[in-house]
Amino acid sequence: MAQRKMGKEMTVTSDGYHSKPTYVYKVVLLGSMAVGKSSLAFRYAKNSFRETMPTVGCSFFKQMIHLETANIMFEIWDTAGQEKYHSICHLYYRGARAALLVYDISRKETFNRAKLWLRELEKDFLHDEIVIILVGNKTDLATEREVTSEEGKEFARSKGLLHAETSAKSNHQVTDVFMTMPVQSQSWKKSRVDLRAPNSNQIKKCCKS
C-alpha cells in the first residue's frame, strides 16, 4: 500500500474559542503507557510541557484553529495506555477523523505495541476513512534511542501511514503533526476546504517518509 502524500498548504491562526467552529475534528491518541500521549496533547493545546500521571480511561482537550475558509475545533482524545483499559478504548475513538499512534523512541516495546493498536483501528476503520500518523515521541532522548527513524518510516510506509518524530518536551514538530491531519483527511478533500499556508515545506519534512 502506498504511503499517503502530503496535502496542500494552509494558513493557521489560533485565538482560543471566540469564533464559532465550522467543523469539529476528532483526533484520538493511542499507544502504550508513558509514551507521552498526554504530554503531546497538552503541548499542542496549551503550548506547555508537563510530566503527567497515567491517564485513567480518557482525557480530553480542545483547540480551535482558523483556516482561510473554515474554523476547525480539534477535539483531542487522549486514551489510557494501561492494558486494563484496552477493552474500553474503542468507545473513545469511534467517530475519529484522525489517530496518532504514539511510541517512545527509547523503548522498543512501545513501537511493537503501536503495531497492535493499528490492528485495533483497522477493525473499525477503512484505510481512507481515517488519517493515521505513526509518531515516535521523545526525540529529546536521542542518546537512548532503541527505534531508529528508518524503522519507523519503513513500517509506516508498509502500512500506508504517515510518520513523524516529535518531542513534547522540546516542542519539536508537535504543531506540524497536528496540522497535517486535517490536510490529509479525505473528508476535507470532499468538502473542498482550501488548505493553503506558507509552512507546507515544514509539514512535508515532518511527516513524509
Image (spheres, helix red, strand yellow):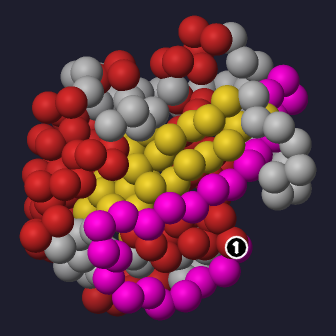
Q: Which residues are magenta?
A: 47-70
**Quadrant where the image shows the C terminus:** top left
From what the image shows, is residue 100 above or below residue 130? below
Where residue 111 appears, as percent x and y from the top left, is 19, 64
Q: Residue at x 44, y 87 (%)?
A: 52
Which amino acid is tagged 1? Asn
Where residue 55 appears, as percent x and y from the top left, is 34, 76
The residue nearer to you, when weighing 73 against 192, is 73
From what the image shows, is residue 143 above or below residue 73? below
Where residue 38 appears, as percent x and y from the top left, is 45, 72
Q: Residue at x 83, y 37 (%)?
A: 20
Q: Residue at x 21, y 30 (%)?
A: 124
Q: Is residue 197 visible?
A: no
Say left or right for 1 vs 10: left
From what the image shows, is residue 171 above or below residue 200? below
**Quadrant where the image shows the N terminus:** top left
Q: Is residue 49 visible?
A: yes
Q: Residue at x 41, y 62 (%)?
A: 78
The residue nearer to you, when weighing 177 against 32, is 32
96 falls in the magenta region: no
52 falls in the magenta region: yes
Say left or right for 120 vs 51: left
Mark 1 highlights which residue?
47
